[in-house]
Image (cartoon, helix red, strand yellow):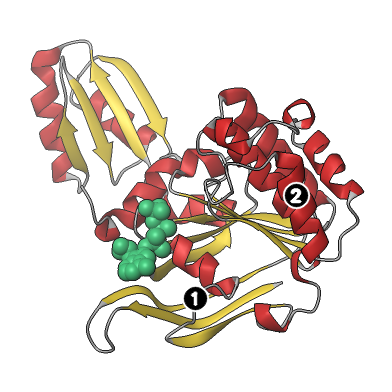
Amino acid sequence: MIEVHELTKRYGRPGAGRLAVDRLGFDVGPGRVTGFLGPNGAGKSTTLRLILGLNEPTSGTATVGGRRFRELPRGLRDVGALLDAHDVHGGRTAEAHLAALARTNGIPRRRAAEVLEEVGLAEAARRRIGGYSLGMKQRLGIAAALLGDPPVLLFDEPVNGLDPEGVRWARGLFRRLAAEGRTVFVSSHLMSEMEHTADDLVVIGRGRLIAAESVADFAARGTRRSVTVRTADPAAAPGLADALAAGGATVRRGEAGTLTVTGTAADRVGVLAFRHGVPLAELTARASSLEEAFMELTADSVEYR
Ligand SMILES: Nc1ncnc2c1ncn2[C@@H]1O[C@H](COP(=O)(O)OP(=O)(O)OP(=O)(O)O)[C@@H](O)[C@H]1O
């Protein structure tokens, strides 16, 4: 379990500077993939660094199994993490890099070969990392996180730079790690990356918590149903739009007699159209996607437009 409580990080001078994380609180449980989402600059990387003890919080706590990262006795065997795939010595081979990590963490050397095999880098194990593509570096970073076979894993934007096959592989890996009972916390700024991978979501914006709940609950919360209605007679569209608006619906007019209606159900739109003698060519009820829910909920905290 990862426990984050009233976590706050201000960069720069006290009282001034930049509030990157603002009284954040959430738990990340085992046996599930938890997506950590937020627009660029929301504070995801900072939060992960605070959990890993790489930065000191201004106030609040971030613990793993009730202990601060620094108090965990087994290092990479307690928590594995991929933070920055570029943060590796380019002159080393992947094998040497992992062997060094294994040595300093009391992990048997054979694990290096095992995890390289697991991430699909066995054949590139003796090549210098400097010549790796971004996707290969991501795979290597994932291998390093897995090295100690830890029960808790953190991944910061792990699928950045992976090709579609790689993205699919990574998703499968995260699901498998969670199925093994591990705590898997994966950051992304794209809901589409998490939609089919995560069980739970922690969503932040401008350092503040927006949501911490299951994917299903998140989707239901953001869902604004809309109805698309298209008349066979575009000249009749304004009349129908007025009738809908008079009934309290919000109507947006599109091209060629198409209306997008929110605030009322599709069957009600059909009845109104019938009453006003408007011939319909289309009547479609639409639930907003998870992506739309995410955009809607984080709209106020998007920093860079
Ligand atoms: N070392 C630092 N010194 C000062 N400000 C920083 C530092 N690191 C991050 N910040 C600021 O803190 C805020 C949060 O940054 P962070 O990298 O944690 O966000 P993020 O959600 O990971 O963003 P992205 O998706 O773009 O990586 C940003 O406004 C950033 O500019």
For the question of whether residue 254 can be seen, the reply is yes
- Please state the horizontal and vertical placement of residue 136, each as a whole percent of the image: 62, 33
Give, as a three-letter code, the residue at label 1. Answer: Asn
Q: Which mark is residue 55?
A: 1
- Residue to which mark 2 is pinned: 98
Q: Depth check: 223 or 58 in front?
A: 58
SS class, disc 2: helix
**Would you identify the image quadrant in which residue 206 lies?**
bottom left
Q: Which mark is residue 101?
A: none
- Please state the horizontal and vertical placement of residue 229, each as a whole percent of the image: 28, 24
Q: Residue at x 43, y 48 (%)?
A: 189
**Would you identify the image quadrant in which residue 168 lies?**
top right
Mark 1 C-beta to ligand 1 under 8 Å: yes
Question: Whereabouts is ligand 1, in terms of quadrant?
Answer: bottom left
Where is 211 relative to 293, above or below? below
Q: Depth check: 26 or 296 in front?
A: 26
Give, as a three-letter code, the residue at label 2. Answer: Leu
Q: Residue at x 59, y 39 (%)?
A: 137
Q: Depth check: 232 or 262 in front?
A: 262
Q: Depth check: 208 or 58 in front?
A: 58
- Mark 1 and mark 2: span between their CA atoms? 24 Å
Where is 183 relative to 177, above or below? below
- Please state the horizontal and vertical placement of residue 237, each as a whole percent of the image: 13, 22
